[in-house]
Image (cartoon, rainbow, N blue to C red):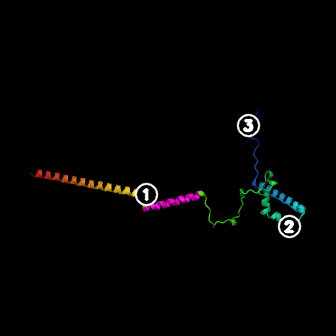
Amino acid sequence: IPKTLKEKGGHKGRARQYTSPEEIDAQLQAEKQKAREEEEQEEGGEGATGDPKKEKKSLDSDESDEDDEDYQQKRKGVEGLIDIENPNRVIQTTKKVTQLDLDGPKELSRREREEIEKQKAKERYMKMHLAGKTEQAKADLARLAIIRKQREEAARKKEEERKAKDEAAMAGKRLQSLSLNK
């Protein structure tokens, strides 16, 4: 009976094997140590049997400049043979926490600067608008004045009509009372 693909584990190949971070660190340390030994052999010719002080120093100082330069980047192709200086290439330097300048002025990105400028301009406009100095504010005030006049006229007309009705009603009552008295 043939097994299906699912039973075999799929058609994508073998199971994945992942390396733990500890193993990676151990491999890096071994590579650094090997590079140091080769460097000492080239310099002194004696190799690992040289000065015990140098060996101790190289083991203790993992953060030395030589180690960083050796491990910094594996060169591709001809780069290992020719030292190329590219002015456009920016080499990233890592800073320690003690070297960071947190109190100094922070440089804002273009978008952040534009956003701040936009907010400030909006605040300035609102202040001028509230003071009535902008064209829109002047137009709004003129419109409000016209509306106030219209409302006053409408209120005055209503009042006159109400008075006229009251007078008419009073006149009607007088006529009734006069006709009743006769």
Quadrant in the rendering for residue 57: bottom right
Task: Report x, y in % for residue 63.
Answer: 77, 63
Quadrant in the picture for the N terminus? top right
Task: Report x, y in % for residue 38.
Answer: 86, 58
Above or below for 16 versus 99: above
Above or below for 137 versus 15: below
The amino acid marked with disc number 3 is Leu
Q: Which residues are magenta?
A: 111-131
Question: Which disc number belongs to residue 17?
Answer: none
* Circle 1 crowding by C-alpha within 10 Å: few under 14, some 14–19, many from 20: few
Does 160 lie within the magenta span? no
Secondary structure mostly taken by the magenta-highlighted segment of the chain: helix
Above or below for 13 versus 179: above
How far is disc 1 from disc 3 in space, using C-alphas? 76 Å
- Check disc 3 and report the residue beneath it: 5
Above or below for 161 versus 51: above
Question: Which disc number belongs to residue 135?
Answer: 1
How far is disc 2 from disc 3 in space, using C-alphas? 61 Å
The amino acid marked with disc number 1 is Glu
* Circle 2 crowding by C-alpha within 10 Å: few under 14, some 14–19, many from 20: few
